[in-house]
Amino acid sequence: MNPRHHLDPATIVSHAAGALSPEMAAVVATHLEGCGHCRQAVAQADGIGGALMAQRQGAELPEDRQARLRRAMLERLDSAGAPGRAPDAPKPSSDPDRLPAPLHPYFGTSYRALKWRWMGPGMHFIRTVGPSGGTLLMLRIGPGKRMPVHGHQGSELTQILRGAYDDVLGHFSAGDIADLDAEVEHQPVTTQGTACICVAALDGPLRFPGWLARTLQPVFRV
């Protein structure tokens, strides 16, 4: 697995600082299991954040210090040279039926045991609410299907577990992550041949321009 779509630097900084919700952190941790590039970036953010905290501790008000540290970490990450060796990933399971470990508290351990709910022709989902009140969605979209056009009223992190899809941002396949904000509006279209399974963390409802999707939104609570 060699992901081509990675976490946004701001998400990396938030994850390193422990500032993400548990639901967002679970999706990030799932991505980090298979992405050496992002594991290295998180390790750099950990090191940079620790050094900056040591330098600035007690020098500013807490709110100002937090904002300044965040900006400084992002600047240091942007200006960092070629990454070194990424921290080792957890040893992947040899069982193709086993879900990634960070998702076990929310969805269990097995793909086969997932209890899918019908969402539309060729589309199924599982919705769970995490400890912070954020939404985690597992989606299984059949090959060659078009999702409704939608935007986001908050942030969305979507990790591709199996299969692939295309949208205005490019081609996303197993191991890739889509790190989206409220500025993005897109329509994922799954590739032919196999269903696409992904997990998404949302900190706000989706925004649908189409009347049918808006009508059904309260039913599926997304």
Image: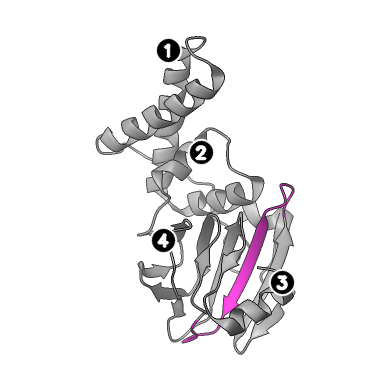
Residue 91 horizontal side relative to residue 84, left or right: right
Which amino acid is tagged 1? Gln
Q: CA distance from mark 3 to mark 1?
A: 48 Å
**Start and end of the magenta stretch?**
130-146
Disc 3 to disc 2: CB gap under 8 Å: no
Residue at the image position 66 percent from the left and 75 percent from the top: 217
Q: CA distance from mark 4 to mark 3?
A: 24 Å
Element assignment for label 2: helix
Q: Nearer the viewer, mark 4 or mark 2?
A: 2
Which amino acid is tagged 2? Ser
The answer to which of marks 3 and 1 sits earlier in the sequence is 1
In depth, the one of 113 and 217 nearer the eye is: 217
The answer to which of marks 4 and 2 sits earlier in the sequence is 4
Residue beneath label 4, please? 1
Disc 4 to disc 3: CB gap under 8 Å: no
Residue beneath label 2, please? 14
Q: CA distance from mark 1 to mark 4?
A: 38 Å
Q: Nearer the viewer, mark 1 or mark 4?
A: 1
Residue at the image position 54 percent from the left and 47 percent from the top: 90
Mark identifier at residue 114: 3
